[in-house]
Amino acid sequence: MKEKPTDPHPLSDLAYDWITLMQNKAQALLAYDQYIKDAEAANSPECAAFFRKVHDADKAQLEEAKRHLVMVMEGKMGAK
């Protein structure tokens, strides 16, 4: 969907994509927290460490995605 002055949808496809990606990453972070607890309860520090590693990578990607979204929303990235 291309954003046009008469378009009733306030988001470009690119902005929507970033928002969707961020939502998915945020949901994954919550799931990883549970996975870490489950691994700790199962006395599996190796599994807990891996889930923390994945959590930290997704958290960093979420932070980067926020910066991209801001630039898209400000018109500094993507087609206008």
Image: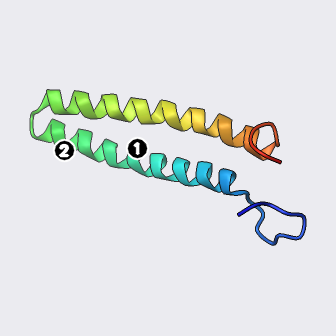
Where is residue 72 drawn, in percent x and y? 74, 43
* Image quadrant where residue 7 sits: bottom right
* In this view, 44 is above or below 3: above
Residue at 61 percent across and 48 percent down: it is 18
Mark 1 or 2: the one toward you: 1
Residue at 18 percent across and 44 percent down: it is 38
* Local SS, label 2: helix
* Image quadrant where residue 50 sits: top left
In the displayed orientation, state which residue is furthest to the right: 5
| Horizontal side, residue 37 vs residue 60: left or right | left
Residues 56 and 21: in front is: 21
Where is residue 32 drawn, in percent x and y? 32, 43
Q: Mark 1 sits on what residue?
A: 29
Q: Mark 2 sits on what residue?
A: 38
Q: Quadrant of the N terminus?
A: bottom right
Residue at 67 percent across and 57 percent down: it is 13
* Local SS, label 1: helix
Q: Earlier in the sequence, mark 1 or mark 2?
A: 1
How many residues crowd mark 1 within 10 Å: few (<14), some (14–19), many (20+)? many
Where is residue 22 drawn, in percent x and y? 54, 47
* In this view, 61 is above or below 18: above
Q: What amino acid type is highlighted by mark number 1?
A: Leu
Q: Are marks 1 and 2 in contact (CB under 8 Å)?
A: no
Where is residue 27 drawn, in percent x and y? 43, 52
- State the colouring used for the structure image: rainbow
Question: Tag on residue 66?
Answer: none
